[in-house]
Amino acid sequence: MLRRARALGEPGEDGLLEVELEEGPLAGRRVVAICYPQLWRRPAGGEEVLANTLGLEMGLGTAGMAVLVPAGGAGEVPENCDHFVKLPYTPLQHPASRPPRAAESLRGVPVAVLPLHSHLAPACCAAAALRPGCRVAFVWQEGGALPVALSATVRLLRERGLLGPVVSAGNCFGGDVEAPNAYSALLAAAGEADLVLAGIGPGVVGTGAPYGHGGMAAAGALNAACALGGRPVLAPRLSRADPRPRHRGVSHHTRSVLEAALAPCRVALPEGAVSEEEVRALPRRHSYVRVAYGAAGLEGRFGVTFQSMGRGYERDPCFFDAAAAAVALALGEVRGR
């Protein structure tokens, strides 16, 4: 879905700009596009560019913008990249620097694993509310968008002082720190923060198969954290408002994650959100902890709006409460039962 387009201005600090498409089914339309500084230089206003319009033409939500195709140089090879390349053996391969420092283990380091990118905001707000001054790092995993620059949530949380370094793991790129896998990413994050959050970028891969979705990144993070000596807490994906039966209550994504998480871990259940019957249907090797803490009131307190798939806190509170409960349990700030 590569289409010729013309840049109508220069990109802002967030990499976004408006372009006019010159060919394809959307020819003549002005659309938002994004370019990534790790991959190519910033285009000038009026310059002809090449845009990937797949998300627009498929009518996708998170991916509903054009992505500019690299043209021109994107910088020099850093001195300390070793043999570390992101998107290797693709036309978009580019060098990455190894993490500057890392913890030796996750013993004593609070780790909360989030199922979707829309859980990041309530998790960061909960950390600030429960432990003011808490340094929060986010491990960005594969399973959704790969470029960190795509996330408006990350930009807003940083503006509010609620989020510190982002560690981009695997082929995700553009973080403050780059890491080749979840293990090194978690250790790098632990070296920079008081609380480590792990999750995917905006959007989520989905195929309809039980394990064929981007949410499985959470299982990888749980297994890695346990192997490194941590006691991670999972925020389950919950909903009472999702129109799809497979995602109502405890989502099938979370059930698959818990099946694949081999080491016993803790799962934070917001008080009153999950029935005993639902809990009994989940793998028994994990600990299901009911937590009397949620995300209510955090939006107004920190000037952040919670939203996922068009639904806000008022429509689906348990979705966002799960992230806040997981942080509260990981930090040891509330007692669960």
Image (tube, rainbow, N blue to C red):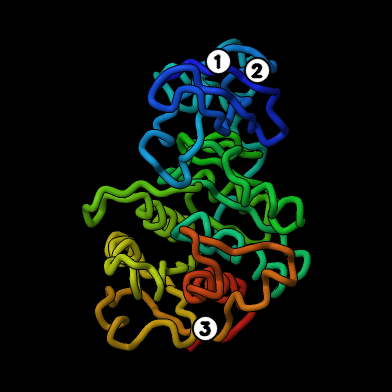
The label nearer to you, 3 versus 1, is 1
Q: Residue at x 62, y 29 (%)?
A: 18
Mark linked to residue 169? none
The spot of residue 45 in percent (x, y) is 69, 17
The Cα–Cα distance between marks 2 and 1, rounded to whole angstroms, is 8 Å
Contact between marks 2 and 1 (CB within 8 A): the answer is yes
Camera-nearest residue between 145 and 176: 145
The label nearer to you, 3 versus 2, is 2
Secondary structure at badge 3 equals strand
Instruction: Name the residue tied to disc 1.
Output: 49
Q: Residue at x 39, y 78 (%)?
A: 287
| First reached walking from the N terminus: tag 3 or tag 2 | 2
The Cα–Cα distance between marks 3 and 2, rounded to whole angstroms, is 49 Å
| First reached walking from the N terminus: tag 3 or tag 1 | 1
Left or right: residue 255 versus residue 168 is left
Specify the quadrant of the image occupied by residue 11. Answer: top right
Camera-nearest residue between 139 and 40: 40
Query: How many residues crowd around disc 3 within 10 Å: few (fewer than 14), some, or many (20 or more)?
Result: many
Secondary structure at badge 1 equals strand
Residue 119 in view of the camera: yes
Instruction: Name the residue tied to disc 2.
Output: 43
Specify the quadrant of the image occupied by residue 106. Answer: bottom right
Q: Is residue 41 above or below residue 147?
A: above
Camera-nearest residue between 88 and 187: 88
- Image quadrant containing the N terminus: top left
Q: Is residue 264 above or below residue 44?
A: below
